[in-house]
Amino acid sequence: MNHQPILDTHKFAKKLGFASITLRMSRVTGTLAGVPAPTYRKIGRKVVYDEAVGDEWLAQFANQPNTAA
C-alpha cells in the first residue's frame, strides 16, 4: 500500500501559503485563488489533505518573471 503524507487543515494551508480560514472557506465555495480548490478527505469529523494534492495544486501556477526594470 502506498502511504502519502497526510496534513491537517492548518499544515496544508501553511504549505499553500493561505490562512486556515481561507482553506476552510474553499471547501464551501469550491474555489481557492480563483481556481478549483484542492481535494480533501473527511475521516469522521476530521478533514485531511494528501501532501501530493498540494504539490499538484501549486504546480498549476506558472512562475512569473521579474518585471522590475
Image: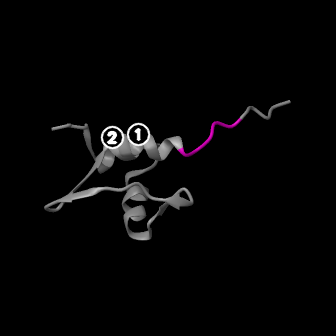
Q: Secondary structure at mark 2?
A: helix
Kindly identify the residue that appears in the image at 46 percent across and 48 percent down. Answer: 18
* Position of residue 59 measured from the top left corner of the image (x, y, whole percent): 51, 41
Kindly identify the residue that appears in the image at 40 percent across and 39 percent down. Answer: 15
SS majority, magenta: loop
Measure the C-alpha gap from mark 1 to mark 2: 9 Å
In the picture, the disc for residue 48 is none
| Circle 1 or circle 2, nearest the eye | 2
Side of 29 relative to 67 (left or right): left
Q: Is residue 60 above or below residue 37?
A: above
Residue type at mark 1 is Lys
Range drawn in magenta: 60-64
Q: Quadrant of residue 30?
A: bottom left
* Position of residue 47 measured from the top left corner of the image (x, y, whole percent): 24, 56
Kindly identify the residue that appears in the image at 68 percent across and 37 percent down. Answer: 64
Q: Is residue 6 above or below residue 39?
A: above
Q: How is the image coloured?
A: one colour
* Position of residue 52 measured from the top left corner of the image (x, y, whole percent): 35, 40
Q: Quadrant of residue 44?
A: bottom left
Query: In the displayed image of the protein, which residue is found farthest to the front?
Result: 1
Q: Is residue 12 magenta?
A: no
Q: Earlier in the sequence, mark 1 or mark 2?
A: 1
Residue type at mark 2 is Glu
Residue at label 2? Answer: 51
Location of the C terminus (image quadrant)? top right
Q: Secondary structure at mark 1?
A: helix
Side of 48 relative to 15 (left or right): left
Residue at label 1? Answer: 15
